[in-house]
Image: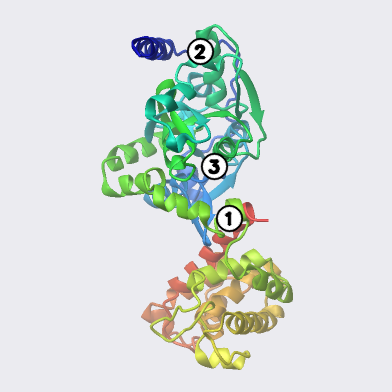
């Protein structure tokens, strides 16, 4: 027993010595300077912050139709602070992310990014969002539930030396690859590093460890912690690095954006909202389990809702992408067939009783009847606008706005656009502009207006939110 204790002490001491020796590997990294000059003023002028991220169970995903994720939510809060909209660009690996950043296809990389010297040659890091350390993820032995703690400890790797000759799977170009190469030097033996496909996420590798497909991977401790809530047979108690900073990355020639983000982080780091978002994705194991168990966690199931098959059939009739129809229904009811508005709009597509009857529904609480009537209404609106709005992309915006506010209010906005020298066949900054002005007395009392007051901001936001959600759905779901 004493001998075992001595071995444990020596192993722990070695971990500390090895970790303190952490250094970047001696490898050449070609600096990739920005090819564009886009800073915060240019971003605000175009009205859009472009975030670069990747699919994962914590950073960016869709659950029950809702776009979610730690980095996604934090970027949304930042975009609102900067007075712009958020657009997301999806990448498969860090090299692609840095390329898109430096060619102007994105403005900020947000994907649980570890700060390293090598990466800092190519991008500028913001102040840290959080800190973590890298840990080994390994599978507990069969029958671990019946083992005593000291018995279990003997079966698990607790010293990095024991990784010599072992095969560890990570993604190429990741901070985990860098750390394992450095660790091999420190322990004086080779760790067999195998590369996962670009399409594999950190969570995919953790799942493969749990299922016995692979034996080891490395990840950040905060990611390992939340995954242990679902994969109870994995162990992540063996550190392989010191505490490291997790941050976002911007172009090296965007100092105004960088300073603005850092000032925003300094103000918000200790706020309730900042901590609520962190805890939601990195501490709430119960919610994490629910997401992974759900048939509607899109990253795993490829499904948005229980109505996907019906939506695909009805979308074909509309000649729409079914994910667009799903984005609209989420906007209307969040896929709740029992939803009812204060005005009496009912069911999945929030139809008023009179409209539902007109387009074939006897029972709006019935999902099939509701979706059928709703798509019949959309067909009618598409036909209505077909002649006056020949461009199909523009026509879609008029159809969605009319579904929300009614054809009359949209026609009023078109008449105002003609009167004031705008294009009545273009939505953005033309018809949408005057639809919003219909909440002002001078405009809803204008001689060309026939349908009076309209809270025009609602249909304009309705169109924007559906089309934005559709982009996310199209990125994540086949």
Q: Is residue 76 above or below residue 130?
A: below
Against 276, residue 91 (above or below) is above
From the image, tell me which residue sits under label 2.
Answer: 161
320, 171: nearer the viewer: 171
Image height of 377 relative to 245, above or below: below
Asked if disc 1 and disc 2 are in contact, CB closer than 8 Å, the reply is no
| Labels 1, 3: front one | 1
Residue 426 visible to the viewer: no
Give the CA separation, mark 1 to mark 3.
16 Å
Q: In this view of the protein, which residue sits in the foreground, 295 or 125?
A: 295
Image marks 1 and 3: residues in contact by CB distance under 8 Å: no
Q: Residue 455: where, in percent of width, then height?
A: 41, 77
| Between discs 1 and 2, the one toward the N terminus | 2
Q: Where residue 32 appears, x then y in whole percent?
A: 60, 24
Q: Indicate the quadrant where residue 146 lies.
A: top left
Q: Is 427 located above or below residue 207 in the figure?
A: below
Which class describes the residues within 10 Å of circle 2: few (<14), some (14-19), or many (20+)?
many
Answer with mark 2 or mark 3, whichever residue precedes in sequence.
3
Which numbered dot is residue 298? Answer: 1
Quadrant of the rendered image containing residue 170: top right
Q: Give the farthest residue toward the top.
A: 188
Instruction: Kindly identify which numbered label has been placed on residue 53.
Output: 3
Helix, strand or loop for disc 2: helix
SS assignment at label 3: strand
Image color mode: rainbow
Q: CA distance from mark 2 to mark 3?
A: 34 Å
- Residue at 67%, 79% (x, y): give it: 382
């Amino acid at each position: 027993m004493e001998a075992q204790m001595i071995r444990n002490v020596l192993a722990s001491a070695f971990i500390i010595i090895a970790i303190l020796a952490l250094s970047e590997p001696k490898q050449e990294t070609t600096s990739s300077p920005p090819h564009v000059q886009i800073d915060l003023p240019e971003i605000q002028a175009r009205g859009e912050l472009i975030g670069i991220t990747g699919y994962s169970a914590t950073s960016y995903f869709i659950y029950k139709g809702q776009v979610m994720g730690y980095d996604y939510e934090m970027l949304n809060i930042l975009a609102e602070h900067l007075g712009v909209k958020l657009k997301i660009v999806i990448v498969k690996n860090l090299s692609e992310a840095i390329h898109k950043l430096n060619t102007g296809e994105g403005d900020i990389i947000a994907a649980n990014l570890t700060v390293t010297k090598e990466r800092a040659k190519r991008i500028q890091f913001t102040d840290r969002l959080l800190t973590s350390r890298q840990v080994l993820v390994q599978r507990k032995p069969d029958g671990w539930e019946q083992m005593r703690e000291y018995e279990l400890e003997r079966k698990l790797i607790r010293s990095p030396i024991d990784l010599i000759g072992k095969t560890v799977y990570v993604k190429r170009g990741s901070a985990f690859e860098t750390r394992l190469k450095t660790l091999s030097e420190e322990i004086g033996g080779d760790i067999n590093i195998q590369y996962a496909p670009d399409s594999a996420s950190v969570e995919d590798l953790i799942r493969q460890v749990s299922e016995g497909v692979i034996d080891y991977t490395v990840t950040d401790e905060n990611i390992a912690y939340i995954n242990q809530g679902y994969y109870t047979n994995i162990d992540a108690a063996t550190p392989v690095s010191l505490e490291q900073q997790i941050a976002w990355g911007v172009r090296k020639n965007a100092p105004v954006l960088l300073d603005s983000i850092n000032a925003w982080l300094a103000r918000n780091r200790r706020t309730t909202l900042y901590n609520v978002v962190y805890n939601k994705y990195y501490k709430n194991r119960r919610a994490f389990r629910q997401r992974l168990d759900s048939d509607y966690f899109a990253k795993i199931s490829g499904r948005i809702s229980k109505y996907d098959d019906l939506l695909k059939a009805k979308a074909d009739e509309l000649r729409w992408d079914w994910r667009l129809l799903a984005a609209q229904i989420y906007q209307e009811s969040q896929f709740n067939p029992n939803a009812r508005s204060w005005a009496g709009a009912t069911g999945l597509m929030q139809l008023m009783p009179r409209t539902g009857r007109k387009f074939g529904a006897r029972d709006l609480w019935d999902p099939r009847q509701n979706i059928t009537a709703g798509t019949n209404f959309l067909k009618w609106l598409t036909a209505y606008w077909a002649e006056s709005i020949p461009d199909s992309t523009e026509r879609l915006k008029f159809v969605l706005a009319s579904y929300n506010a009614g054809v009359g209010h949209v026609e009023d906005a078109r008449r105002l656009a003609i009167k004031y020298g705008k294009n009545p066949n273009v939505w953005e900054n033309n018809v949408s502009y005057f639809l919003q002005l219909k909440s002002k007395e001078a405009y809803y009392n204008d001689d060309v207006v026939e349908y009076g007051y309209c809270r025009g901001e609602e249909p304009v936001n309705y169109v924007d939110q559906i089309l934005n959600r559709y982009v996310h759905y199209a990125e994540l779901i086949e």
